[in-house]
Amino acid sequence: MRYLGLDLGSRTLGVAVSDVTGTIASNYGVIRHNEEYSSLIPKIQEIVKEKKVDEIVLGLPKNMNNTIGEKGNLSIWFQHELESHLGLPVHLIDERLTTVQAQHVLLQNDTSRKKRRQVVDGVAATIILQSYLDQKGRI
């Protein structure tokens, strides 16, 4: 079973994809959208078809006190949009601090500031997806 991981940001969408066994997540890249969230659906649809994705994992931004704010509500809306347009299950997973983790990984690898800005959301999507796959493997 193959999974697609998504990190929805205000200007970019980080994308990750799993291997066919659903064990290892890899960075697929970043899609720019400038808050035109509906324009992302056809692009995601292409990736789903190309990679033969079975399920989608979408990061759910929560506040540190576990409440859901404006960005979290946007992710919930986007989850419903994806499910209705793609006909695939979309799982929400807590994404708190994944961007911080992604920045840390990139800093450890001496990635330039310019490059970090370009790839951080893809790395965050990879962390989100790998976290989901690891949790699923323990069940």
Image (cartoon, rainbow, N blue to C red):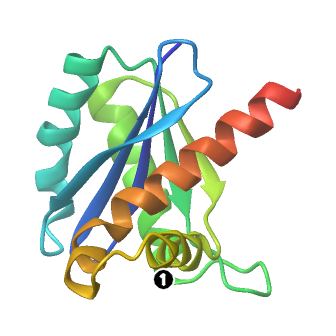
Q: Position of residue 81 (x, y in %)?
A: 33, 46
Residue at the right extreme? 139
- Residue in view at x 45 percent, y 54 percent: 125
Question: Which of 101 and 34 lies nearest the eye of the viewer?
Answer: 101
Question: Which of 18 and 59 lies nearest the eye of the viewer?
Answer: 18
Q: Locate the C terminus by quadrant.
A: top right
- Residue in view at x 42 percent, y 59 percent: 123
**Number of numbered tags placed on the structure image:** 1
Q: Position of residue 119 (x, y in %)?
A: 29, 65
> Does residue 24 appear in the picture of this structure?
yes
State whether residue 96 is above or below residue 133: below
Q: Amino acid at mark 1?
A: Glu
- Residue in view at x 39 percent, y 76 percent: 110
Q: Position of residue 1 (x, y in %)?
A: 53, 12
> Does residue 77 appear in the picture of this structure?
no
State whether residue 13 is above or below residue 86: below
Residue at the front extreme? 110
Q: Position of residue 58 (x, y in %)?
A: 49, 50
Q: 126 left or right of 82?
A: right
Q: 10 left or right of 99?
A: left
The residue singled out by tag 1 in the image is 70
**Badge 1 local density, few (<14 within 10 Å), some, or many (20+)?**
few
Question: Which of 116 and 108 lies nearest the eye of the viewer?
Answer: 108
- Residue in view at x 44 percent, y 48 percent: 79
Q: 59 left or right of 96?
A: left
Question: Which of 102 and 96 lies nearest the eye of the viewer?
Answer: 102
State whether residue 65 is above or below residue 62: below
Name the image quarter holding residue 97. Answer: bottom right
